[in-house]
Image (cartoon, rainbow, N blue to C red):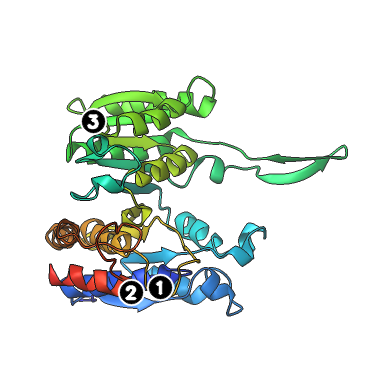
Amino acid sequence: MKAPEVAVLPGDGIGPEVTRAAVRVLRAVRGDIECSEGLVGGAALERGLTAYPAETRDLCDRADAILFGSVGLPQYDGKPLPERPEFALFLLRRDYELYANLRPVQVFPGLEDASSLKPELVRGLDLLVVRELTGGIYFGQPKEQRTVEGVDEAVDTMFYRAPEIERIARVAFEAARARRRKVTSVDKQNILETSRLWRRVVDAVAREYPDVRIDHLLVDNAAMQLVRRPSEFDVIVTENMFGDILSDEAAILTGSIGTLPSASLGTRRVAHGRFGLYEPIGGTAPDIAGKNVANPTAAILSAALLLRYSFGDDANAACIESAVERTYADGLRTSELARATPALPTQGFTEAVLERL
């Protein structure tokens, strides 16, 4: 039988550092998994390759899951999308139809004071953002800049079909059944036709889940309620652009974007689950790259999500999550979270998690 294989794509900035940490933890609990590394993003462009080289594509085609670091470097800002590191993520999401982006947002005990909100507002916070990832304004056509009668203009098209909304709604309702049985659907139905379709389809799917409570919020109100009463949310489901914005807002409630993992799941089935791409959401942070100060938590927790969704291994996923939680409970912190206590470097924090597995 073929050994389970993970395509490891470290990418740019702090991506290689935090991905190394995640691979160490992954191998500590699952020695049978084969991890094979490939070039992606700026790391590939700097070698004269495309952002998503053919060799990396072949590696991902063979793999059961992708463990991703981050892509993006300032020297590529302003270039056309196909010439930027971020184009690799666009292609990965499109080619593997990674339509369901899951972003769990959790405040670990002991980190309440790190949040920008009052500790009592975020204590015990545990919500999940389910973002539709392959439709909407990011993928709709036409998408272009042009000159008409001597005037520069640009157009982006927001486009959704009912089946795209149905499948992401089902992901949200199924997730809610395993949590606190509440889904909040976010749209802008008072203005946008796509949102009116979104709400109608979500309501239709909701009738199949009578045990799950459904409510709707306009996106501007949802953004306000996330900072006013975040603990009242359970599962938030929304379209691509709104999800991009709201998930980052929700992430910072925890005090550090360096603690938040994500899973992007597609339609392809693998032996024990669904093919997916797993990555921290914090970006490349080039200003701290190579300094051994980046927080590896999000990458490590992304490895836990990989085990849960692509390998059906809840036990080892929970083992990793528990080790991370106990590391924070013991007062250990990386630099962006350290207050009165000394900060651990990336490698030191990783060692602390490994000791608690």
Distance from disc 2 to disc 1, alpha carbons, whole Å, reads: 6 Å
Q: Quadrant of residue 349?
A: bottom left
Question: Number of callouts in the render?
Answer: 3
Please state the horizontal and vertical placement of residue 274, each as a whole percent of the image: 28, 56
Residue at which label 1 appears: 16
Please state the horizontal and vertical placement of residue 277, each as a whole percent of the image: 36, 60
- Between 136 and 292, the one lying in front of the other is 292
- Between 132 and 241, the one lying in front of the other is 241
Query: Is 233 displayed left or right of 58 in the figure?
Result: left
Residue at which label 2 appears: 20
**Are the residues flagged by discs 2 and 1 in contact, CB closer than 8 Å?**
yes
Q: Secondary structure at mark 3?
A: strand
- Three-letter residue code for mark 1: Pro
- Between 165 and 298, the one lying in front of the other is 298
> Is 246 situated above or below 28?
above
Please name the residue shown 42% across and 25% down the image. 221
Q: Residues within 10 Å of mark 1 (few under 14, many from 20)?
A: many
Q: Secondary structure at mark 1?
A: helix
- Three-letter residue code for mark 2: Arg
Residue at which label 3 appears: 182
Please name the residue shown 43% across and 68% down the image. 14
Please state the horizontal and vertical placement of residue 324, each as a whole percent of the image: 19, 60
Please name the residue shown 19% across and 41% down the image. 124
Distance from disc 1 to disc 3, alpha carbons, whole Å, reads: 37 Å
Task: Return the residue found at the far bottom.
Answer: 47
